[in-house]
Image (spheres, grey):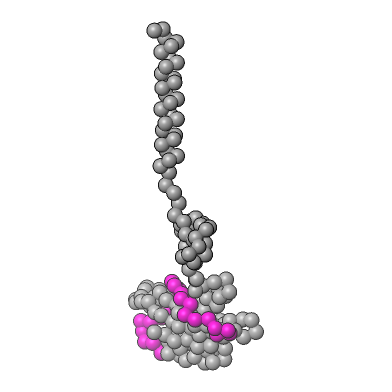
Amino acid sequence: MDLRKSLKIVGIIVVVLLLAWLVWYILNIKKPETVPVNNSPETVTETEKVPEKTFAEKVKDIEPKVTSDNVPIVIAAKRFAERLASYSLNRKDIDPVYELLPLVTPKAKLLAEGYYEELSKKEAPFYGVSSKVVSSKVVSVENDQAVIELNLLQAEQDMSGVQIKDYQSILTVELLNINNSWQVDNFIWK
């Protein structure tokens, strides 16, 4: 047998094996799961493929508490909390409530004045407290009222600026929508 005939025979065998493998593959492909389109057990005429949800599709089904509609509420609550909870005895000549005025109702203004009065009575070595909101939770939003719960990291300093105490606090803030502006109406320390 010469080399040409040998190569033709080997080529034919390879092609036949590829065709056999292709036929086997087509016959053994998994069939997708199907469910009836109408839920009637008597008539199952049409079926449709049930795709598995991707991660992105599953996330879309989760309804977030913070939405584009209530982001201004959370921002207003955070600004209020950080301004309210940061205070220095060095700034006694400046009314700390003045910085809160755009964010509060008259009721909350009175509550803030009482809070600052209590802080000013603290004894040495207290000199001031700085606060940062580390998390927020939208408890409820209904019509023109909202409740936001804020977790704050707070640090008290002495006159030399040395931190003497640090802790976490929870502040619940109740807001009202007044003339399309969210304002704090009440706040409660927990």
Q: Residue 145: name its quadrant.
A: bottom right
**Does the magenta segment cover residue 137?**
yes
Q: Specify start and end residues of the magenta stretch as a single range.
A: 120-145
Q: Height in image: 175 above or below 130?
A: below
List the single residue furthest toward the right: 179
- Determine if residue 1 is in view: yes
Q: Position of residue 77 (x, y in %)?
A: 52, 79
Q: Nearer the viewer, residue 141 or 115?
A: 141
Which residue is found at the position 47% from the left and 62% from the top? 58
Which residue is found at the position 53% from the left and 58% from the top? 46
List the single residue furthest toward the front: 42
Dominant SS of magenta comes to strand
Q: Height in image: 52 above or below 8?
A: below
Q: Is residue 181 left or right of residue 59?
A: right
Q: Position of residue 174 (x, y in %)?
A: 50, 85
Q: How many marks?
A: 0
Which residue is found at the position 45% from the left and 30% from the top? 19
**Does the magenta segment cover residue 57?**
no
Q: Nearer the viewer, residue 68 or 56?
A: 56
